[in-house]
Image (cartoon, rainbow, N blue to C red):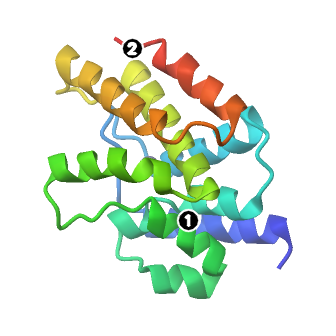
Amino acid sequence: MDPVARLIKAVDFAALKHRRQRRKDAEASPYINHPLALARVLKLEAGVEDVDVLAAAILHDTVEDTQTTVEELEREFGKAVAGIVAEVTDDKSLPKPERKRLQVEHAPHLSPGAKLVKLADKICNLRDVVDSPPAHWPLERRRAYFEWARAVIDGLRGVHPGLERIFDEAYRLKP
Ligand code: ZN
């Protein structure tokens, strides 16, 4: 399948899987805006051309937050895309503090493609915390989120200086 067709298929698949989900911002935006924002940062801001990485970014929350399985992604999008999504998927059977600790611990060992998706995810999440934070997040929680995201990203630097610079610019807006 050609690259454009693969990406359209990924957008269509993710939109369908996330169709009943909303983001945690005040206006409860459609969830799909988030994976699309990752793809925008990767391709339009950082110039990432790797279609497997772009497709994985669009699909990155389908396993963690919907009924999608890694096997399903492998069947539909191939091993490379499914592998990246699996790498950035938290184990939801673990308590949240443990999941957050493991993200910091695992960051240095991610594949280059998964590092790019992780960078884009954290860039988008920091911007969301600044621009449209969840209504019930007090200042301390927003600041703690920034610090944790920074700890994750500090563990994977060296993969894409341009994207890391975009992360640093987002971090500079820490509340
Ligand atoms: Zn995400």
Q: Residue 70: where, in percent of width, then height? A: 46, 79
Residue 114 in the image: state x and y as whole percent: 56, 56
Give the residue type that dot 1 points to. Answer: Ile
At 17% from the left and 67% from the top, the residue drawn is 93
The kind of residue on which mark 2 rests is Lys
The quarter in which the C terminus is drawn is: top left
Where is 74 relative to 161, above or below? below
- Residue at the spot of label 1: 84
Residue 107 percent coordinates (x, y): 44, 49
Looking at the rendered structure, the secondary structure element under dot 1 is helix
Q: Can you see residue 36?
A: no
26 lies left or right of 136: right
Residue at image location 52% in from the left, 42% down from the top: 156
Q: Which label sits on residue 128? A: none
Please identify the residue farthest to the right as the structure is shown: 2
Q: Nearer the viewer, residue 14 or 161?
A: 161
Crowding at mark 2 (Cα within 10 Å: few <14, some 14-19, many 20+)? some
- Which of the 4 image quarters holds residue 46? top right
* Residue 92 image offset from top left, x and y in percent: 23, 64
Query: From what the image shows, is residue 133 above or below residue 35?
Result: above
Position of the N terminus, as image quadrant, is: bottom right
Sooner in the amino-acid sequence: mark 2 or mark 1:
1
Q: Which residue is mark 2?
A: 174
Distance Cα–Cα, label 2 vs label 1: 28 Å
Q: Judge left or right: residue 72 versus residue 54.
A: left
Which residue is more in the foreground, 109 or 167? 109
